[in-house]
Image: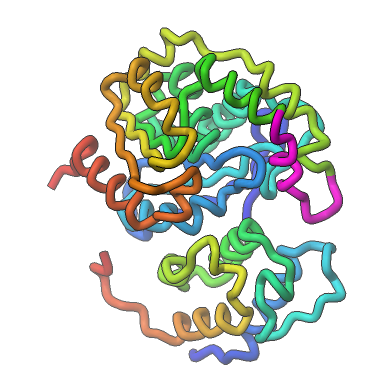
Amino acid sequence: MSFVQANGVTLHVQELAPARSGRPPTVVLLHGLAADTMASWFFTLAYPLVEYGFRVVLQDLRGHGRSERPVSGYALDDFVDDLDALIGLQADGPVHLFGNSFGGTIAYAYAARHPDRVAGIVAVESSPPTEEWLARLRERLRHRPRILATSAPRSGGVRLADTTLRDDLPASRLPDPAALAAIRCPVLCLYGERSPAYELDPSTRRLLPAARTEVFAGQRHSLLVDQPTEVWAVVTAWLDTEFPRGG
Amino acid sequence: MPVDNATVTAEVTQILRTVLGDIEPDVPVSAESTFRDDLGMESIDVVALAGRLQARYGGVNFARFVATLDVASIGDLSVGHLVDHIVAELNTPVPAEGAR
């Protein structure tokens, strides 16, 4: 287990690296909001990605998992600033960003800010940070505030429900849509057919017409943990196509 | 030199207590203890445990171990199950180059 200081918070980070030497490309795995942690990547695609040849960096978002849970500072930009600082510490070239749900939203926001620092994006059950996305998030936090209570700390610290996340995140400043549309790296969007996240796909396609989209029949928002083998098959095929490895 | 089960059990127990912090100091840890029901561990605690074990047992392939698990089943794991994997790996001769 390791902790890094990034953007003024202590983040729980795990690094998994291939055994062979050289300079493998780095992929940063970003989890979703509230009850989610890096575990949903760790027990699904993390080791397959290492086997594939990536150096894998997993991060618990601020307020989540074993990262520090400050009382305030939960706007989208705060999460992007954390990632920005982490990538500054962990990588010296463009990185791949894989995000689950809100983690994908962070990935898009980071790529809008630093298009030249992102090699590729895999967004599982995720939407770019658009007005439409933010409206849905506001709705969800208003009507289902208990989603924040599910993320309970082990040691009696501040619960996510006791932080200002419910105020900060809905008030997030959004990236300029032109900056999102200017994302040029390969993007793979994965959805569960029965998930509400899939309903935002048309607006994502309008924004990023070159993105590749794959829909998993009958699946819900928990696609990543429910179908890791199927997700990995699609991701490897996409990686092989977009980032062919020289012989 | 072959490692024995008792030594690894003692080390893993020590690391487990570190990972769990001061939250549950009174909970006994044995080979039969299950991660979720007996130790109250959540999946993120298992990740933290794996990180520490990898640092302690560099030669152990935790990827192979993790590949046998999924998010839903990791809580059912017992300490003994984990120790058996570590002992088996440590007592297996390292294969020659070209594993991948």
Residue A189 sits above or below residue B69 on the image:
above
Residue B63: % across, % down = 43, 65
Residue A79: % across, % down = 61, 29
Q: Main secondary structure of the magenta part?
A: loop
Left or right: A237 with respect to B31?
Answer: left
Identify the colour scheme used: rainbow
Question: Which residue is painted at 61% across and 44% down in the image?
Answer: A60
The front one of A133 and A143 is A143
View extreme (left): residue: A247
The front one of A85 and B45 is B45
Residue B56 sits above or below residue A11 on the image:
below
The residue stretch that appears in magenta = A143-157
The front one of A155 and A127 is A127
Left or right: A214 with respect to A56?
Answer: left
Question: Which residue is painted at 39% across and 22% down in the image?
Answer: A204
Q: Locate residue A230: give its quadrant.
A: bottom left
Question: Which residue is painted at 69% across and 65% down in the image?
Answer: B41
- Location of the N terminus of chain A by quadrant is bottom right
Residue B43: % across, % down = 61, 60
Residue A140: % across, % down = 64, 30
Question: Which residue is painted at 40% across and 34% down in the image?
Answer: A95
Residue A92 sits above or below residue A247 on the image:
above
Question: Is A73 a magenta residue?
Answer: no
Q: Is residue B15 visible?
A: no
Q: Locate residue A6: give its quadrant.
A: top right
Left or right: B83 with respect to A225?
Answer: right
Q: Is residue A176 visible?
A: yes
The front one of A11 and B45 is B45
